[in-house]
Image (cartoon, rainbow, N blue to C red):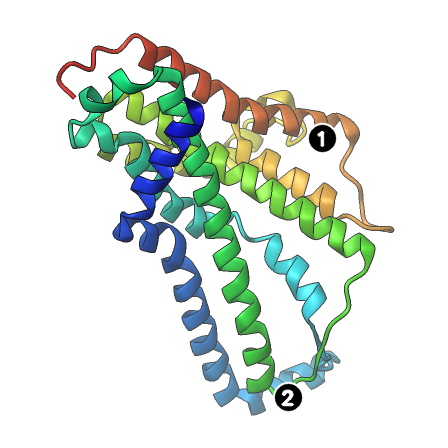
Amino acid sequence: MLADAIRAEGYRFARNRTAVFWSVLFVPIAALILGLVVSFAAKGNQAELAEVSAELGMVSEPLNLGAALVSNAASLAGGPVLLFVLIGAATLFAGDYRWETWRLIRARNRRSNLILGKLAALIVLAFAAMAALLIFSMIGEPIRAAIFERDVTFSLSGEQIGAFLGLFGLGWLRVVQFAMIALLAAVATRSLLAALFIPMALGAAQALGAPMLMGMGVMPDSWTLQLLLPGQAFDRLGEMILGGEGAPGVPVALQVKAWISLIGWTVLPLLAALAIFERQDLSKE
């Protein structure tokens, strides 16, 4: 029955072309176009930039696509992806409240399966959004290299492959974690707008929370800051994955706190949403 719910949610969302475009394709396309516009603008000022680079002792090096792959993987769960995947997440989680279709489907499966089916569709959505951004980013790299007349090379060590997989998986977890706030908001309020704006407001508050807490004397490696700010936990874990030989490492104790924060912010909203949904009266939806 869970498999039926997953197939149904995937089918329904795949047919929603507007949500698919905005949550999967818009950010990669916009990033590629903006990056090329910036590159062409910089090309027009290449003479001035060359003088500054020469004064600073900077030499134009060949573009290593392997290193660019790892670098791009580190930014796949940035703000634009979180924001626009949220459109798809809100559609998935709150659409049946808005369209008043819960009463039509809730009798065909267990309530927990209905929510978990939406979660599975969200996991695939997050993967698709990140994969699309990565593909478009890598398409843009050789184009920018051609604009600046840089040579292109490719080398990828085993350590870099491990870093790429780790960063992609960590970013995937971060996107899903952020969407779990939308799930809880959608179930608790039965509102699509709340599923959009509550995670956005909470994300903005958490982004501003780090400097405020540190200004109050809360240390970056403390339980308080890590548990309250999953974005900070994500950043520390990313530093752990990127850190190579000679780079300052992330203490094991801080890694544990960061993992507990990121996983907790993923699992607890899901459990709360399941508990609320099991007790909801859906006769009018």
Q: Quadrant of residue 263?
A: top right
Q: Quadrant of the C terminus?
A: top left
Q: Is residue 158 left or right of residue 202?
A: right
Q: Earlier in the sequence, mark 2 or mark 1?
A: 2
- Compared with 52, 187 (above or below) is above
- Which residue is depicted at the point 68% across and 52% down? 164
Can residue 197 be seen here? The reply is: yes
Pick the front one: 77 or 11: 11
Pick the front one: 34 or 3: 3
Q: Amino acid at mark 2?
A: Glu
- Compared with 265, 234 (above or below) is below
Pick the front one: 210 or 188: 188
Residues packed near mark 2 inside 10 Å, few (<14), some (14 to 19) or many (20 plus): few
- The mark tally for this picture is 2
Q: Is residue 117 left or right of residue 247?
A: left
User: In the rendered image, which residue does mark 2 sit on?
Assistant: 51
| Residue 246 in picture, x, y percent from top left | 86, 51
- Which residue is depicted at the point 28% across and 19% down? 108
Q: Residue furthest top?
A: 279
Q: Is residue 188 left or right of residue 257?
A: left
- Compared with 39, 284 (above or below) is above
Q: Quadrant of residue 70?
A: bottom right
Q: Tell me, yes or no, whether the two marked residues, 2 and 1, touch with CB atoms within 8 Å.
A: no
Q: Amino acid at mark 1?
A: Gln
Can residue 201 be seen here? The reply is: no
- Which residue is depicted at the point 39% across and 17% down? 112
User: In the rendered image, which residue does mark 1 sit on?
Assistant: 255
- Which residue is depicted at the point 52% across and 47% down? 77
Q: Alpha-carbon distance for marks 2 and 1? A: 43 Å
| Residue 140 in picture, x, y percent from top left | 53, 73
Q: Quadrant of the N terminus?
A: top left
**Disc 2, SS:** helix
